[in-house]
Image: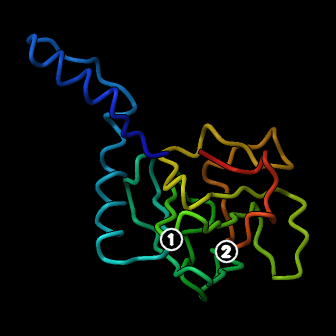
Amino acid sequence: MRLRKPATMALAVGLAFLGLSLPTTSAQAATVCDTKFDDYQNRGFNHVHAWSEPNCGGTWLGDAAQGTADWNWGDSAGDFTGSDDNNAESVMNTASSSSVVAFYRLAGDPAGTWDDGYVCLKGSELYVDGLARNNFENRRDLSVDNRISAHQWVTPSACTDYSYIS
């Protein structure tokens, strides 16, 4: 989730003027994702991105253009391959604010029912800097962290209110 807040910035400036500082927060830690998001946006990327660590860190697992689907992140085809399967800890959507990407617990095909869980990321949400705090929509007992095996771009109506991650 993008954590830039004008009120927080104003408070930080005011405290700096007084010679004080804000304690380190997750908002400050999110600057890596912020920087990467801004860079991808400036280059016109309309993609989904994934990393092996929180805060858009660790190994960059790859990206896939808006409109593409990868039904098996563990095979040798598609934009995500091999060890990308079940390895994502942070994800980003750099497409338009109305775009939605769905992530699935298990690999499958376009006709799959996705009974074992899915989550959605709105373009307006920008990124999730830590998947550990999110659970799958129809598997609320199962964290999304290191459990994504497929993705596709969907319409907002394809996702329930409970499936959106942040």
Rendered image quadrant of residue 82: bottom right
x then y, percent, for residue 85? 62, 67
User: In this image, 12 relative to 104: left or right?
Assistant: left
Tag in front: 2 or 1: 1
Residue assigned mark 1 = 95
Q: Is residue 76 shown above or below 158?
A: below
| 152 w.r.t. 134: above or below | below
Which label belongs to residue 105? none
| Percent position of residue 28, x then y | 31, 34
Residue type beneath disc 1: Ala
Observer-nearest of 21 and 84? 21
Residue at image point 71% right, 79% down: 71
Question: How far apart, in angstroms, are the residues tagged by discs 2 and 1?
Answer: 10 Å
Q: Is residue 64 left or right of residue 17?
A: right
Three-letter residue code for mark 2: Trp
Q: Whole-percent x and y of residue 3?
A: 41, 39
Q: Which class describes the residues within 10 Å of circle 2: few (<14), some (14-19), or many (20+)?
A: many
Q: Using the image as rendered, state which of residue 81 and residue 120 is in the foreground.
A: 120
The reply to whether discs 2 and 1 touch (Cβ–Cβ < 8 Å) is yes
Q: Name the residue located 68 percent from the left edge and 67 percent from the top edge.
A: 149
Q: Secondary structure at mark 2?
A: strand
The colour scheme of the drawn protein is: rainbow
Image quadrant occupied by the C terminus? top right
Tell whether 67 sits left or right of 137. Answer: left
Say which element carries label 1: loop
For the point 40% across and 77% down, which residue is it? Answer: 45
Q: Which residue is mark 2?
A: 153
Q: Position of residue 20 (x, y in %)?
A: 14, 12
